[in-house]
Amino acid sequence: MEGLSMDQLLATDPHASVGSWKAILTLVLFFLSNVAVILPLRVPIPIVLLHIGHHILVLLRIIPDRHTPLKTRHVYLNFITVPLASVLLLLAAGVFDGKTLRDGIVGTSGIQPLNIMALFISLAYISISLDATGLFRFLAFWVASKGGSSGRKLFTYLYIFFLISGVVVGNDPVILSGTAFLAYFTRVAGITPPTAWIFSQFAAANMASVVLVSSNPTNLVLSGAFSVSFLSYAAHVILPFLAASVCVFPLLLFLFRARSSQISQPPLIPKRIDIGLSQAEVRATLVDQRGAIFGSVLLLVTLGVLVGVSTIGVPVWEVTVPPAVIMLIRDLHYDWTTHRVSGPRPGQGDSERSLPPAEPRSQTHTGIDQEQHELQEVSSHIPTSSGPESDLSSAVSLPVSLKATPASPVTLLTLISPVVSRITKTFPTVTHIAERLPVALLPFAFLMFILVQGLSTLGWVELFARWWAAWIARTGVLGAVGGMGLLSCLFCNFCGTNIGATILLARVLQLWADAGDVDVDPRTRDGALYALALGSNFGAFTLTFSASLAGLLWRQILRQKGIHVRGQQFALVNAPISVVAMLVGCAVLVGEVYVEHRGERRVLRTPTVPA
């Protein structure tokens, strides 16, 4: 496929390689996998099967027999189970073979899933560990205190803060901690409903994640697929990001001011806000100052090294995994020296980093302690396997309430539970971080890589590349930027989140860019590539929560805090924001590629003649 010329690609019979039952079955299952992300379902397990399964587990002494009625259980058809079932079915039917699996996991054509996921999970650990020190909450409260009593100024400061934080650590940590912070902050300040604040935070976090390759897995996919250095990538997207974020801000003010004037409610952005925080109370939110400094330096050095070595071909996992291990060792040492000696402090539980005995927290009555407790609950109570929107973080703890009694037999669960309980009590910080790691993203991403690899092997990607080549032949640079920007935003909503959309569209662009005896116009190539980068990030705040896993997590945290955002509201509020962001970003991108490639045209590739 990669040896096709442009003329051959355009002339390819679209039904020649995709008319077989294998190709059709693969496309149907790929479609169903995407539907499961948008519309997850749960199917009740028949009570007969539950009794049979329970009896088998008791006979094998895996669980004790509790002699209580079994509760209804469900099978969840979500973004992990359906893609997994699809891949297994395609394997059983002989459609996929070992090579397809290997290429989908190890990688091919420059896309290396293992490398990408190792980098992502390593940086995620550092970022979440840094957040567990209380640094993000401290900075958020510090920024809020600088806003004084002016609602407009405070709204502006927090918007800028979320943009900067999203650039450095990516959108997921900002969503995890920033959403819980805003839920508490708006309640204390009496801002009801908090629509303006939560939607501006969500847009800012997802716009900012486009800047650095390390901030979003979609950026990693693109940089690997087209061998783009981290520095070159950031240089191409920084101006579109800045222009979009600047133009979106006045739109936010206009939208929420207009909504306030149309409803008989307090203003969504009040003129005056009084949250009554002293500097001592703000400092109290930073529960591990040494860890915050250590983690900040480690993260900044890691990002700097990533940018520096991306031009010399060093595998990115070699840069990010060692710092993550260093941070893990530091967290283990912190827990061992702190909780091993004194145990967790009362009220802190096992899911939050506590202060050393020599540095007691100041007890205040302004809600800081309550906010700390609520933020712990948000982190520790995000369900991991209890609903169709779950699996957004991994659970490392098992039920510890099932202890063996003199009359009950020893089972595997009763043996494991005390061990797990002791580990979580001895290492609460590491347990807390592990529970928040987006581990469920790993199987989802690998399954999507495998399915897209199957589509490529069976000719579907070639067909899509043919359609894209025909579109480019008629529209040129403007069509490349505008078309890919629109496609990527739409595909985020209907193609297995922004990750699935990026994997598929990156494969299409790869085949299109590599096809032929004629070099693709560099303006068209770069325009399509970086429009996909913008769309895969900005597409998270378009029509559906499932446009990104961050969107599902954002809704989940808000629900736990008693803030309910309906799907229709999500689409109506985000639609104008995403349209303005993409139009401005794509307009700047068009100017960039014309300025960068002035005078360049596509030329014939000269065949190599043996001497």
Image: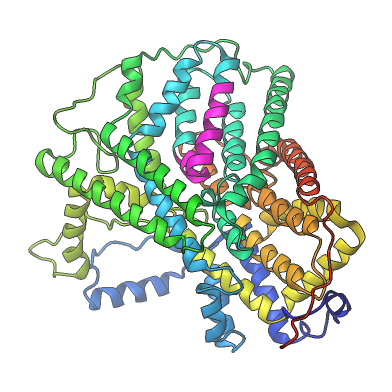
Q: Residue furthest right?
A: 474
Q: Residue at x 41, y 74 (%)?
A: 48
Per the rendered image, the range of residues in magenta is: 156-176
Please indicate, yes or no, whether residue 80 appears anywhere in the rendered image: no
Position of residue 298 relative to residue 247, above or below, is below
Q: Is residue 254 left or right of residue 227?
A: right
Q: Position of residue 9 (x, y in %)?
A: 83, 76
Residue 511: image quadrant is bottom right
Q: Residue at x 49, y 17 (%)?
A: 189
Quadrant containing the N terminus is: bottom right
Q: Is residue 123 magenta?
A: no
Q: Residue at x 20, y 64 (%)?
A: 416
Q: Is residue 501 left or right of residue 516?
A: left
Question: Depth check: 564 or 372 in front?
Answer: 372
Q: Residue furthest left?
A: 406
Question: Depth check: 238 or 37 in front?
Answer: 238
Q: Position of residue 320 (x, y in %)?
A: 40, 55
Q: Is residue 168 magenta?
A: yes
Question: Depth check: 359 or 526 in front?
Answer: 526
The majority secondary structure of the magenta stretch comes to helix
Please indicate, yes or no, whether residue 528 appears anywhere in the rendered image: yes
Position of residue 495 relative to residue 10, above or below, is above
Q: Is residue 92 left or right of residue 457?
A: left
Q: Residue at x 33, y 18 (%)?
A: 281
Total numbered badges shown on the rendered structure: 0
Q: Position of residue 163 (x, y in %)?
A: 56, 34
